[in-house]
Amino acid sequence: MTENTGRNDDSVPGLDLRLSGAGVLVTGGSSGIGLAAAGMLLTAGARVTICGRSRDRLDAAAERLASPRLATVVADVTEPEAAARAVGAAVEHGGRLDGVAAIAGRGRPGSLLDLPIDAVTAEIGDKVTGLLNVVRPAVEELARTGGRVVAVTAPTARTPSIAMGAISAGRAALDNMVTTLAIELAPAGVRVNAVGVGLIDTPRQRERHRDDGVTVAYDEWLAAESSRRGVPLGRAGSADEVAAAVVWLLSPLSSFTTGSVVDVTGGLPSR
């Protein structure tokens, strides 16, 4: 585990999320939604541990966030030992564990009829293990603090996309798991919810734009994607808009919410 020792990061005035002193683990915290969530949690006064697969990207995130309340750990959460190590690092850094934001993920686009079977099973498996591998070693600590778990789903869990067949199946499995875990962990006082994520302007979308090999500018391509997907609000969302929902679900302000999906999709339902 590497702890950042940059400048202090005082909370800004405004709504008190009651997260000051909380210990939170954010998987996939080195970029995109995870990075935005980590920044908001730090602003709210939490002690945050972010994990990811790349040390270089984690170091860049730590430099950007620049907070002594931030720690980083290299871990691929699809591997049980690595995920358990990340949970342990978060408990050590925070002195407690109040929340887990399971943001990490990767996507394998393609039709279920075209993708190799091992790619389909790997995609579904990554969605399942990326959540379960961090929840299982965290349960005891979360039960002690009345903690919260937030996962990420999408409208394709409800309305599958042929072009994202394996991703859609994985999201549906994860959505079911959120409901099941919420029921199972409710007696322990642990809440489990998800954020439904639509078309979001993140580094991953920029990679998709580049990989598509299109000649139109990124902003024009993103607007066309919004139109193609029929987003009612007519635009892509931002990582900050998703992160705000993640942080609310991690806060005590959402204390009577469990087994739910909060959509940040521009109007497309995830359930």
Image (tube, rainbow, N blue to C red):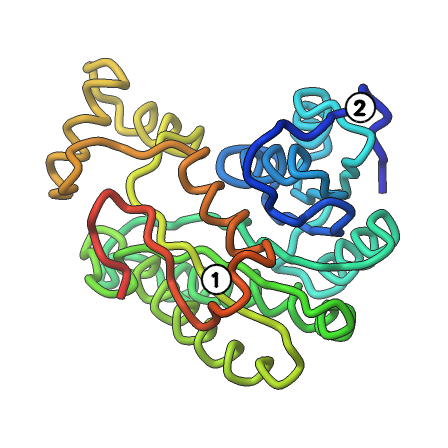
Residue 171 drawn at (x, y percent):
37, 63
Q: Which residue is mark 1?
A: 127
Task: Please provide percent x and percent y for residue 50.
Answer: 69, 42
Give me the residue at 24% from left, 13% from top: 217
The residue shown at (56%, 33%) is 14
Q: Nearer the viewer, mark 1 or mark 2?
A: 2
Q: Closest to the observer: 253 or 235?
A: 253
In the image, 256 versus 150, the foreground residue is 256
Residue at the (87%, 54%) spot, across then down: 95
As drawn, the label of residue 243 is none
Residue indicated by mark 2: 8
| Quadrant for the N terminus in the image | top right
Q: Residues within 10 Å of mark 1 (few under 14, many from 20)?
A: many
Mark 2: give few (<14), some (14-19) or many (20+) Cα within 10 Å.
Answer: few
* Figure check: 50 above or below 120: above
Q: Percent x, y for residue 241?
A: 40, 37
Q: Nearer the viewer, residue 183 or 79?
A: 183
Apparent side of residue 101 relative to residue 246 in the rendered image (left or right): right
Residue 215 sits in quarter: top left
Type of amino acid at the residue the image marks with label 2: Asn
Tell me: residue 77, above or below residue 80: above
Left or right of 202? Residue 225 is left
Task: Please name the residue shown 25% across and 18% down the image.
Answer: 219
Choose between 238 and 28: the one closer to the eye.
238
Dot 1 falls on a residue whose secondary structure is: helix
Q: Position of residue 71 (x, y in %)?
A: 79, 38
Comes first in the chain, label 1 or label 2: 2
Q: Disc 1 marks which amino acid? A: Lys
Q: Determine whether, in the image, residue 46 is placed left or right of residue 240.
A: right
